[in-house]
Amino acid sequence: MKITRVRFLALSLGLLTLAAGAYAHHGSANYETDKSITVKGVATGFDFVNPHVQIFWEAKDDAGTVQKWQGELTSPNRLTRVGWTKSTIKSGDTITISGYPTKSGAREIWIQKVVMGSGEELPTGGGN
Amino acid sequence: MRNRVGTFLFAALAGVALSSALPAQTGQQGGSAKPAAASAPAPEHDLSGVWNMHAPPAQRRFFGNTYTAEPPEMTPWGTEKYNAAKPSNGPRTHSLKETDDPVLRQCLPPGTPRIYLQPFPFQIVRTPKEIVMIFEYDHTVRQIFMDGRPHPEDITASYMGHSIGKWDGDTLVVDTVGFNEKTWLDRDGHPHSDQLHVVERFHRLDRDNMTMDLTMEDPKALAKPWKSTLYFQLKPDWDIMELACTDNGAFEDFEK
């Protein structure tokens, strides 16, 4: 997969340890930026568009019911610079998404970390 | 597998070199960023290329939104406008639907120097009579006239201001006036008036590193000049891409 040949400059040594919202096109009002949530599931959609790349996926809750989840990343301009393309995530891919949960309790994440089924972690901060 | 480990190690070492070479900065004017590894000498009087802001570690806490750790001293007029603003970025965050940030909802041009805070690169292009700055953010353009002209007597106000530049030794000094009052100074909601006067001093340290000493003066909004230093890295492999602010509209309903 193309992403494996990318130099993971974005991951190294906290170069992307930023205050919440620092590199978002808008702020963090919708999210609890002092909490963390991780959800593993199966991708159902991937919109590689401005202003924010969006991932949609399904995951089973504790009762075994399939729930729909969505999450936002930074601009595709920034992700392109660390190796992403519009084909990086495909429907059916197993993905583990971590990030900030919503204040509303909605099943939505401001994504900080993406791990593919292979165990590969994708850089999410974007070129800097 | 070995390739990826090696690649990660390279990136990690580059990261160490970069972050340790940049001195701690408080965002105050003065001081210079030292380049991380061996670069090449700066071409003379030439700032051409694609540049990306690269704040040193001490600035990263606030450089998504503003220029200094300490807020600027504002006049009563400035303070009143600041208190009334509903930014989305920064500590007083509002949602996309509630914010009155002119950039986010109305897609107005960000103004100078706020355009530097939009987290995307820009390209500097030289022509015989001007330096053109093409910002990836909403394809915003600044023209810096280098032909010796003064600011017009009867200036027409604009979002980005009227910019004239000249070389002072190896420093490009850019003087900008003629602003309308429809933009913010930063993403935190600090205001400016039509009396805003921006001076930028660009210095290309070597091929890959450039600093800009920034001074904002506005007797109506700021009680005293507001100064900072911005740091930029050359990105020879990057092209300016498209990013249209109008796409924000389709995203407004995404966050629940």
Image (tube, coloured by chain):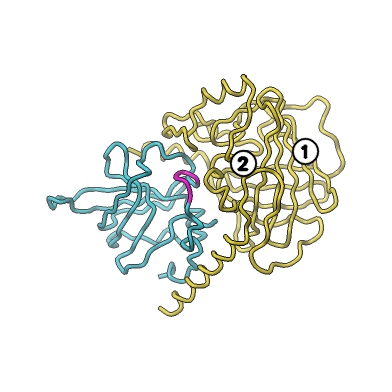
Specify the quadrant that holds the N terminus of chain A: bottom left
Does dot 2 land on a helix, a strand or a loop? helix
What is the spatial separation of the Cα atoms under label 2 and label 1, in whole angstroms? 16 Å
Q: Which of B210 and B46 is in front in this view?
A: B210
Chain painted in yellow in the figure: B
- Name the spot of residue B77 as percent of width and height, x first: 62, 19
Q: Quick check: do tags 2 and 1 share a chain?
A: yes
Q: Nearer the viewer, residue A94 or A22?
A: A22
Q: Which of marks 2 and 1 is nearer the N terminus?
A: 2
Does residue B172 appear to the left or right of B137 in the view shown? right
Does residue B247 appear to the left or right of B232 in the view shown? left
Amino acid type indicated by mark 1: Asp
Amino acid type indicated by mark 2: Ile
- Of all chains, the one bearing label 1 is B
Chain painted in cyan in the figure: A
Q: Give the range drawn in magenta.
A: A18-22
The residue that label 1 is drawn on is: B175
Q: What's the magenta bit mostly, secondary-structure-wise? A: loop
Specify the quadrant that holds the C terminus of chain A: bottom right
Disc sitting over residue B102 in the figure:
none
The residue that label 2 is drawn on is: B115
Q: How crowded is mark 1: few (under 14 residues within 10 Å), some or many (20 or more)?
A: many
Please tell me whether residue B19 belongs to the stretch shown in magenta: no
Q: How many marks?
A: 2
Please tell me whether residue A21 belongs to the stretch shown in magenta: yes
